[in-house]
Structure formats: structure tokens, C-alpha cells
Amino acid sequence: MINRKRANSQDVAALAGVSQATVSRAFTPGASISAKTRQKIEAAATKLGYQPNIIARSLSKRQSNLIGLLFTNWTHPKAADLLKKITEALTDYGYKIIVQSATSNHQTDDALRDFLQYQVDGVMVFSATPSSEVTTEYARARTPIVLLNRTGLALNTSSVSIDATAIGRHIATSLLDRSHRRFALISADPDSQIVIKMTKAIASITAEHPNAEIIFQRSGIDGYEAGFREINRIWGNQAARPDAIICSADNTALGILAGCKQHLNINVPDDLAVIGLGDIPPSGWKDHNLTTVKIPHDEMVSKAVLTLIAGIEDPSLEPQTFEFQAQLILRGTTRLVPVSTESPL
Amino acid sequence: MINRKRANSQDVAALAGVSQATVSRAFTPGASISAKTRQKIEAAATKLGYQPNIIARSLSKRQSNLIGLLFTNWTHPKAADLLKKITEALTDYGYKIIVQSATSNHQTDDALRDFLQYQVDGVMVFSATPSSEVTTEYARARTPIVLLNRTGLALNTSSVSIDATAIGRHIATSLLDRSHRRFALISADPDSQIVIKMTKAIASITAEHPNAEIIFQRSGIDGYEAGFREINRIWGNQAARPDAIICSADNTALGILAGCKQHLNINVPDDLAVIGLGDIPPSGWKDHNLTTVKIPHDEMVSKAVLTLIAGIEDPSLEPQTFEFQAQLILRGTTRLVPVSTESPL
DNA sequence: ACATTTTATGCAAGCGTATGCAAATATGAC
DNA sequence: GTCATATTTGCATACGCTTGCATAAAATGT
């Protein structure tokens, strides 16, 4: 134990025979300092194993270079990808990321307040909606928030999400084109904004179409096993069999598919169409070949990051809302249809 | 814009008619302060929207309550789960997490040095190995590191990993018991310690067994599609067909399986056994039913977190190394064998 | 060589909080 | 009510760095 205490700029200054301020300048890119003294200082610094203390720097500069990332939806099939993308993009801009997890709205607000205590320069929230109290606190602190996968319109907060209404309408018309009439909607989280909007959109289409209807919707069904069980339950009620199932997650859709194939002998897509959401890799695998919705996550993340950075650099910037178009990928779990009657994207 | 600048403890003190020190005490659990003044202060604080500045606190207390988390293997099937578990566990202990991503060894070292600048109290590294220079710097700064999925023995660093040798031997003997003799090894990252150790273990078993051998090993094969392509290539070379493939990832194994079923008409498990690693959910799905290795990630994460906390609380603690036992889950892609000849775990 | 501009350095005052010490106040025993 | 003791409070300093200002040194022009 040679050095009990970490070396600071004073120590380096003493060793290099300069003032502490000069050491600080040596470690500040673009500061006014001559080449020779910089060398002297660098020598002294490496000798002492000196590294600037960023905490102190943050305090002094009143800017932490920290960005809060609040993550809730860890079971999202792209969770790791998103996290990586966000982390790396923000790192490229010179920020460090501090992550928190939240599972309830209560936790969301607490976590966001924690971020404020850490003097973060900005916050990104994935799949959660803060309370208006908290967004007000953020506005007061002039710390920008960007919501990913939620819309922040009502909160006067920037957000990046998909145009759930458009894709909902597109799904509905595609199914109608394929002569499906009895839709079932299956989702994991009933509070998901995307699901709510898609449901509304689908309902608006079926309302205009004779004989077509949403015969039921169920939520709380999450994952392959749950889907597998659910299709058994659904098919058990002969009176209320759908001829199309729209699922809020590919995983669940794949479980439904497995159920169809194995126990129930349901002919997909002729007896039943199945549509997922997310286009996870197995959906494209040849043995599943699930029709699903592809969400442009990469573009969304990039946009969210850019929006956040812009908000940090110019605090007077108004919140911005972006909606990306999702894409319906028609594969084997929906019928083919003559190209001429195919509705355009 | 009522309050351009954030309120600090001075402002609260002024409003509450006490000294700044007293405000500080009001926000320090267990500090000596009377109930009345605390109330006064809390009233003033909420009025001003005051939140303690943790950056300043960290500087003053010389402890940041920050833990660095360095993540490299984002394609790990459990990446999101691990991250969630780590984040939540450390949060429960009162720490905040700074994440960084690294893809090269160079980046690993840089990221770890960044952590040090942020005065983190400890660091957790997932699936990467720091250089000895960096671990020395950490030792000097008395900041503990815990490696997850790597062994830190050589670096005098704590680590939590699996006993790859044991599971390698177990896989090999299981295959031999099932009359497989020609093993192929497929992996993504050739530098993975686990793969290297498993390979050695398998080799040591085949060496003792007449006729048995590792006929080839290939790395850089990562994911379903890659597996699908790879089995086609492998089977194309009739002279060098294996009768068992051991894969470093379930994804890849599932791709191989799909290839076997679709184009090649390979009878699994009789012509070819396939073993994965990781036991991701689809492996257990009825349509795949992949024999694989289950890794006790949850226990490993808990242990890693506890080890890190222990190291932070007692800096004089010696580094500790833990190896967990992985479990071979025999499913449909390996032959059944009479129970009596089954080798024990 | 001198005056003038440019560049490099030092000084000192913050940034917002914690905390040892001393002073002040409250508490309790008698 | 008094005194000893326990509890609260305030004062002042420290944490390690940045930065405006002033000064010293170096570079430039004539």
C-alpha cells in the first residue's frame, strides 16, 4: 500500500512544480497551456497515477455528463439491443449512462427523481410514462426527457414511438382483405399505449365493415408458454372461435402457433390467421414463419438519442414528438392474396 | 421560468431560518436533529423544490455510491435478464449503476479507467477480462472488481463463473455413453474462456477413449442463421461428418436443428446429436426440444453482487473466486439411454 | 532594442455538501 | 431552581476541480 490516498491535482502540481490551476488546464482539452509544461505535468501525473476526479469536475462545471436511462420493459425481445444501442450512442457523444430499473409507476417517478439528484444532463425513459408532477420538476430543472415507446404529447415531453394507429389500421384491412372477420386481440400489458392505440384503430376499421368484429380481447398473456395455454382455452370455446389472432408479442404468437400445430390441429392460416408484433428472429425462422410487425427500433433509438442531445445542448428547445411507421411483414401465418387486391402500406 | 437556478441547501436554510449545516443534517438519515426543525426544513425544501445534490455529496463524502457495470456480450441470450438482475440487486443495496459497453479489450481497459475517474465504489465486468495494468490501478485505488463469466484468478480479482471443465467432461461422457464418437465443436467467440475450457475438458475425455475424437472445431458461428448455414457446409463434406455437435449457444444449435430437419433430412438424434448451451426458452419449446446446458445465472449474479458489496465494505478483503456447476438438460436432440448407464452429474 | 500584442501561468473564489468542534439549548435528577 | 448531562445547532473548513481576472512571460513587429 504505497499510496493510501488517491493523488489529486495538488499533488501533481507540487511534483511538476506548477500551480494546481495549471494541472487542471493540462487536463482540459483546448485550454491555454504550453507544450513543455503539459509534458512535465503528464509525467508527474503518470508517476502518481493521477486521474482527474470527474465528480469534482462535475460539481465545479455544474454539468455531470451523466444521462439517466430508465428501463422498465426488460422482457422486450429487443431489450438488450436497445440498451446497447442507447449506451453506445450516448457514449459516443461523451456521456455516461446511469441505469435504473422500474416496474411500477411509483418506481418510475422515484427513479426519475433520483436521476435529478445525480444532476443528470438528460433522461431517456423506455416504455414507461412519468407522472406530470415529475415532468414538471424536470421542466423546472430544465433537464430534458425523451420517452421511447410512449408518447409524451400530454406531458409536454419529447417522445419517439411508432404510429400505432396506422399499423393497427393496416393490420385490420389486411385481414379483411384476406376474408377474416372475427378478430381476437391478445396482449401482455393492458396499459401499453401501443396496444391501446392499435386496438382502437382496429375497432374503427371493423366498425365500418359489415360482419367484421373484435370478438374478444385478453391481456396478461405474456410469452410462449402463455400463448400455448391460451390458444387451448380459446379453441375450447367453440362458440367464440376467432378466425384471426393479433398478438402484442411474437413470443406469444409463436406459442399460439405451436398450440395450433400440436394439440389442436388448427390449420394456419386458413382456419386461423396469427399475427405477432416485433419480428424477433425466430419469427423469421423457417419452421415458424410468423406474419408480424417490424418496428424500426434502430432508427427510433437514433432519433431518441439525437433528440435528447439536442434538448441538452439547447434547453430552450420545445419538446418534439416523433412517430415512426411500423411495417407488416406477411409470412406464412396469414393467407396469400392476389397482389391486385393487396392494400398498399 | 421562475427558478433559473436550482435551489441548494443554502437557499433552504435561509428560508427555514437555520444554518446550511442543519439542512444537510435534515437530509442525512440518523443525523442529530430535532423533529421541529426537520419539519421546518422539509417545508422549506418542498417549497423550493430542493433535492440534495448527490454530486456534491459524493465529493464531500469521498464516496460516490456508484458502481460501474461493464457489459460486452450483448448478444448473450440472457443479457437483458442479467442486466436487470444486476441493476436491481445493486439498487437494493443503495448503489446506482453506470453502464458502459465494450467490444474490444482496448475498450474494456478504457472503460474501466473511465469508471475510476467517476470514483465508482466498485465495478462489475460481464464477459470480459481487463488487462493486468488496469487491475493494478484498481488495486491501487482500492476499488474492487468482480468478473462475471470469467475467472480472475490470474489477475488477483474476484470472479464468478461456471465450472466449464466439469460440464465439458460431463457432456463428453454423456455423448460417449450414447455411442457418439465423432464430435464437432461450434462456437461464436474463440476467446471465450468457457469455450476454451470446455474444449480442453472434452479433449481430455476423448483422449482416453479409443475411436472417440474431436473431428473439428469452428468458431465465429453465431446465431440461428449462421447455424443453419453451417450444418449445410458440414454435411456437405461427407468424409468429415460428425455424429455429435456441441454448440456454444442455443441459438446456433437451433439453426443447426432447423437445417437438419428441412434440407438435409438428418435424423436427430440418431444420425447426429446436437447439444446447445444456455437453455434459452425456445430450446424447451415442444417443437425444438433441444438438449442443452443450463447455467445458474441467477445464483451467479447474486453471488457476484454479494462479492462486490463485500469488497466495497471491506477493502482489505482478499479477492474471491467462485465456480458454479452447470447442468446438462437432456431433451430430444440426444438419444435416450438406459438409466443404469447414465453417468451421474 | 523597444513597444505591443499574444500566450501562459498563478491567484483566489467558487461549485453544494458533510462534519469536527464548540456553543447553545433542552432534559432530567434532586 | 440548580447543576450535570444529553441533545441540537452553528461555524468554519474541507472535498478536488474550474475559471475569471490579473500578472508574468514569450512572441511579434518596426
Image: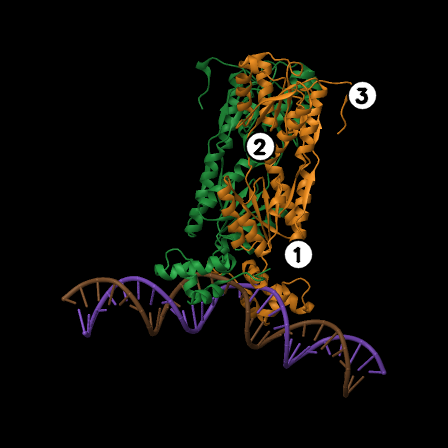
Chain colours: A green, B orange, C purple, D brown
Residues tagged by mark 1 and mark 2 found on one chain of the structure: no
Circle nearer the viewer, 3 or 2: 3
Q: Chain of mark 3?
A: B
Q: Secondary structure at mark 3?
A: helix
What is the number of the mark on residue B316?
Answer: 1
Q: Residue at x 64, y 53 (%)?
A: B94
Quarter-of-image position of residue A199: top right
Q: N-terminal of the two: label 3 or label 1?
A: 1
Closest to the observer: A152 or A147?
A147
Q: Is residue B96 visible?
A: yes
Q: Position of residue A21 (x, y in %)?
A: 42, 65
How far apart, in angstroms, are the residues tagged by discs 3 and 1? 50 Å
Residue at mark 2: A77
Q: Chain of mark 1?
A: B
Q: Amino acid at mark 3?
A: Ser
Q: Position of residue B106 (x, y in %)?
A: 48, 43
Q: Is residue B189 above or below residue A269?
A: below
How far apart, in angstroms, are the residues tagged by discs 1 and 2? 41 Å
Residue at mark 3: B340
- Badge 1 crowding class, 10 Å Cα cut-off, few under 14, some 14 to 19, many 20 or more, is few
Q: Is residue A217 visible?
A: no
Q: Position of residue A242 (x, y in %)?
A: 63, 19
Q: Chain of mark 2?
A: A
Q: Is residue A275 above or below residue A303?
A: above
Left or right placement of residue A78 versus residue A13 in this view: right
Q: Secondary structure at mark 2?
A: loop
Left or right placement of residue D20 versus residue A198 in this view: left
